Image: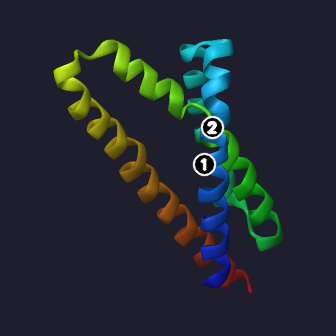
Amino acid sequence: MTEAGIALGMFSLFGMFGGIVGGALTDRFGRKQLILFGLVFSALSTLSFGLVTDIRVMYPLAVVVGLIGSLSNPAHNAMIADILPEEKRQEGFGILAWWATSPGSSVRASAASWQSTISSISS
């Protein structure tokens, strides 16, 4: 259980740095391109977490996914700010935050549980 906590901590820590870099990349490449990259990478990284069977692979993967997975966050925020009128922005950011964390967390938890079950069966 400690190993999973370390991997999750690394994911979150490096996710903060990815968001900082994502702001500059959003200005340089545009919002749509960065959001599309984020969606594709998020799908692939979620799949890769479910397939990892060795913790030594999980740690570097958590770093990479944390960094790259949060690159598109500034683009999402900027798009919400542009699309919604000022009186609706708070609600828009709340909806974005919920959809960005709740379903993703459920999928990650399910994938980790499945991987744990498979590992214990094969041991």
Residue beneath the point at 66% across and 45% down: 17
Residue highlighted by disc 1: 16
In the image, 115 versus 58, the foreground residue is: 58
Quadrant containing the N terminus in the rendered view = bottom right
Residue beneath the point at 60% across and 48% down: 16
The quarter of the picture where residue 96 lies is top left
The quarter of the picture where residue 31 lies is top right
Viewer can see residue 59: yes
Label 2 near label 1: C-beta < 8 Å?
yes
Q: Residues within 10 Å of mark 2 (few under 14, many from 20)?
A: some
Residue beneath the point at 76% across and 72% down: 55
Residue highlighted by disc 2: 20
* Above or below, 21 relative to 6: above
* Above or below, 10 relative to 92: below
Viewer can see residue 118: no
Residue beneath the point at 67% across and 53% down: 14
Q: Mark 2: which amino acid?
A: Ile
The quarter of the picture where residue 92 lies is top left
Relative placement, left or right, of 103 versus 11 is left
